[in-house]
Amino acid sequence: RVPGPRPPPRPPATMASDGIWVPDPDAEDKYPPPKKGMNRMTLKLIRKRAEHNEGIISTLEELTLHQEELVAIEPCLGTTCRKLKILYLQNNIISKIQHLHHLKDLEYLNMALNNVSKIEGLDKCEFLNKLDLTVNFVDVDELESSMDHLADREHLKDLYMMGNPCEANWPGFKNYVIARLPQLQFLDGEAITRSMQIIAKQQLPKLAVELRSLAQEKRDEKAQKEFVDYRDIDTDEKAPYTPEVRLKMYEELAEEKAEKENRELRRQPRERDHAGEQRKKVERVRQREEEGKILQCNEGKWEFHFDEESVKGSIILDLHVSRHLDSSLIDLDIHPAYVSVVIKSKVLRLKLPSEVNASLSTAKRSKVTGHLLIEMPKINENAPTLFGKSKARAEKEERLQRLNGERKPGLGAPTKKQSVGVHAKPLDNRRPALSASMADLMVKDSSSRRKKDGMAAVSTRRVDDPPPPPAVVAAADDDDEPPPPC
C-alpha cells in the first residue's frame, strides 16, 4: 500500500469570540489552549468583581481584574460594561488589546505586567486619558505602528512604557515618543516640558530613520529564531524573560492555585440536596410498599403518640416534628391499616389500632410547635379502643373535671382545656397545693376545727349537693361556751 501525502501542518490555535480555541492562521497568540487553572474572562467573574456596584454590570464604571491569570480580553467585557471609565487588567498574561471598541467612555486602562507586544484596539476609546503598559513586550519592530495608533488619541495625557524592550534597548525612545505624541503631558511619570518637546521635534527625522533600521533588524532576528513551545521550557532562574517563559510560569502558578482551592473545597462540608434526597427516598419507600414490604419503623426516632378518645370514632396521631423543618420535606401516605410518613429522608411507618377511612383523613401542622396532627376516622366507630384509659383513672378524671368545671370563669376557677394525646397531663397530676378542689379544702378545714375545739363532728357536704335545711339551735346554758363561728 502506497502511503498518501502527509496533511499540511496545523496552524496555531487561538481563542474565538465564544471562548473556544479554533485554528486561525492570522492569530496573534500562537500558543495552544491553556491547561486547567487558567482563567477566562466571563460574566460570572465580572459580576463577582462588581460587588461594589451591587453586582450590576450594566452601569459599572470601574472594574478590577488584576492577578486573575487571564489569557485574553473576552467580547463580553465590551458588550456588557459599556459605561466603564477605569479598567484594571494588570498582572495577567494577555497578549493582545482587543474587544474594547464598545468602551467609548474609557479614561484609564492599566495593562501593566502582561504579554502585549503591540498597542492596538483603542481606536474607539475617544476619551482615553491614561494608559499604563509598564513591563510588557513592545519592541522596536512594533513601536512605529503603536505610536501611529496613539497619535489619534487627542485626550491621552499620561503614558507609561517603562520596562518594555523598546524603552530599555533604544536610547532615542523617549524623544521619539514625545515628538510623535505632542498631546502627552507625562511620560513614565515625568512631566514633559516645552523645551523637551522642541528638542524631540528637532531629532524626530533622525530618530525615525534609526528606528526603521532597528525594526528591520529585529524582524530578521525573529524570523531566524526557531519557534519554542512554551510547554517544553524549564522555568528556572536562568530562563530569559520572554512571553513563552512568562506563560509557562503563570500556568504553573494557576495550577498550584487551582489545587489549593480544590483542597479547601474538599475540606468544607458537603452541600446536601435535601429536596432531591427526599424525592428519591419517597420514590423508593412507596415502591417497596407497593411490593408488600411493609414493616413498622422509626428511622428518625420521632416522638409520637396515638389518641382515640379526644374525637369520638377517630384516631389521632400526634407526631412531634421540629418547628423549623420545612413542610416540603414531609410526605404523608395513609392506608386503611397503616400510616407512612417520610420526614427528611427518614421513614416512620406505624400500624393503626383499627381500620380507618383514608379518603376522609386530614393532616394539620401547628405553626407554634410544628407538630403534625393526623386525624383518621374509623371505618367501624364501635371498634374497641386500644389506646384507652383505665376505668379507675377515667373515673378519677371525670370527678375532678366535674368539680372544677361547674364553677363559672372569673371566680378563680381553672378553665377546661381539651387535651390531645396520652402525653397531656391530667388534672390530678399537678402539684398537691394547686390540684385540691374547693370540696377537699372544706373537708380539711372542718376536720381541723373538730380536733382543736373538741366539738361534735360537723357533717361535710359536696359543693354540688343541694344546701341542707336550716338547723334549729337550742338555747345554750350560761356555763357553756358560745359555739364557734361558722
Image (tube, grey):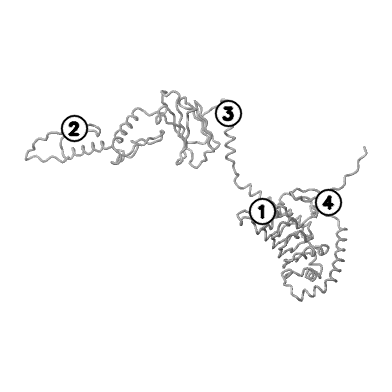
* Marks 2 and 4, how far apart at CA: 121 Å
Q: Nearer the viewer, mark 2 or mark 3?
A: 2
Residue type at the position of mark 1? Ile
Question: What amino acid type is highlighted by mark number 4?
Answer: Pro
Q: CA distance from mark 3 to mark 4?
A: 63 Å
Q: Which mark is residue 403?
A: none
Q: Earlier in the sequence, mark 2 or mark 4?
A: 4
Q: Which residue is mark 4?
A: 25
- Image position of 146 with respect to 80: above or below: below
Which residue type carries mark 2?
A: Pro
Residue in front for this viewpoint, 271 or 214: 214
Question: Who comes first in sequence, dot 2 or dot 1?
Answer: 1
Q: CA distance from mark 1 to mark 3?
A: 50 Å
In terms of sequence position, does the residue under pointer 1 or pointer 3 come before the other?
1
Nearest to N terminus: mark 3 or mark 4 = 4
For the point 74% across and 74% down, which residue is it? Answer: 193
Question: Could you tell me how far apart the alpha carbons at marks 1 and 4 are, in whole angstroms?
Answer: 30 Å
Secondary structure of residue under mark 4:
loop
Residue type at mark 3 is Arg
Quadrant in which the N terminus is drawn: top right
Q: Secondary structure at mark 1?
A: helix
Q: Quadrant of the C terminus?
A: top left
Q: Name the residue that disc number 3 marks.
A: 288
Residue highlighted by disc 1: 46
The residue under the point 84% across, 67% down is 211
Say whether residue 48 is left or right of residue 474: right
In three-dimensional space, the C-alpha distance between marks 2 and 3, rounded to whole angstroms, equals 71 Å
Which residue is rendered at x = 25% and y = 33% of the image? 464
The residue shown at (77%, 73%) is 197
Q: Are marks 2 and 4 in contact (CB under 8 Å)?
A: no
Nearest to N terminus: mark 2 or mark 3: 3
